[in-house]
Amino acid sequence: MYNKSNLHILIIRLSALGDVAMTIPAIYSCARSNPGCTLHVVTSAFCAQLFMGAPANVMLHPVGKDCQHGLLGTWRMLRQLHTLPVDAVADLHNVLRSWVVDWSFRLRGCRVQMLDKMRRERRLILRHGKTASVPFTERYFNVFRQLGLNVEPSFTTVTANDNATPPDFSAILPADGLVPIGIAPFARYRNKTYPLPLMEQVVARLSADGRFRTLLFSGGKTESEQMERWQRKYPNTLSVAGRFSLADEVRLMGRLRVMVTMDSANMHLASLSGCRVISVWGSTTPRCGFLGWRQSEGDALVAGCDCQPCTIAGSAHCRYGDYHCLTGLTPEHLYTRIKETTKI
């Protein structure tokens, strides 16, 4: 164990959004378990919005896009990082860019510990689907422990000590007895995305039920346009796409009874807010290690196809072309699970 009371640890996790979100329980827990240490977190400027209510000894160092690509970008980032007092490096990314940073600090005498991506284990999962991976949230804790730090899981939500004033959600959250739920129907890859015609049936059932206010969360322009069409078509359905900052979307998720997501960034954002998540899995399964922080595997909907999982992180295509791992979950199944979860 380190005995120094003023240890400075550089933490690297530049992207992607869901992966950065998964590091936060470990980072906040480490900061609280080691109040004499200073944790310098390096991440993208966009992802830095997630670090709400951070312990006082967590220092954010957001980097712009000009520091994230190519050798020139890495050099710019190094110039910034070498101005920091660093005793050890926790590389939670383990990619080429972070390796360059690691070696630059090794040459300065700093201890470096990298995230174990367990690539051999990944191959075993794909060959023998019953093999389960160590959750990534736990792997991030292990990086700090391997640096010799005592880290007790103490994270609850990013809003627990959030002093920022949230926006007025009164026009969005129901005041008429309706149960507020969220749906984030998109993921980066097609074989991780529940087919939109089926998800629309879920939205239609919730609207017809009359007891729910369904808030739709999405990402890009095309997705937002789809959400707007559902909003116009189904009563008590509202798209919140583009209305709030990333941090405020997380604050809003914390006010919901349940979120329905794919295996996507939104699952991890909702987990940071403390919201219960019903997650839909296609080409991946929770055995791949990406289940949200303290979410129950019982709330993870998996069709149970023999070919699941066929990928660890997702891809654009299904080897059989029918995406049965997703279509095998019926809209009625999702609707029923939402009712059970909200106890309606």
Image (cartoon, rainbow, N blue to C red):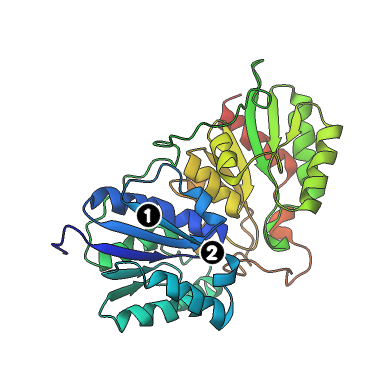
Disc number lying in front (1 or 2): 1
Which residue position is annotated with label 1?
59
Q: In the image, what residue occupies the spot 65% across and 40% down?
A: 244
Quarter location, residue 199: top right
How far apart in space, not on screen, are marks 1 and 2 (Cα)?
A: 17 Å
Q: Compared to 187, does 205 lie above or below?
A: above
Residue 313 placement (x, y as % from top left): 59, 66
Three-letter code, disc 1: Met
Quarter location, residue 103: bottom left
Tag 2 secondary structure: loop
Q: In the image, what residue occupies the spot 58% across and 29% down?
A: 342
Which residue position is annotated with label 2?
15
Mark toward the start of the polypeptide (1 vs 2): 2
Please tell me the numbered disc located at residue 107: none
Q: In the image, what residue occupies the spot 69% across and 39% down?
A: 243
Placement of the N terminus among the 4 image quadrants = bottom left
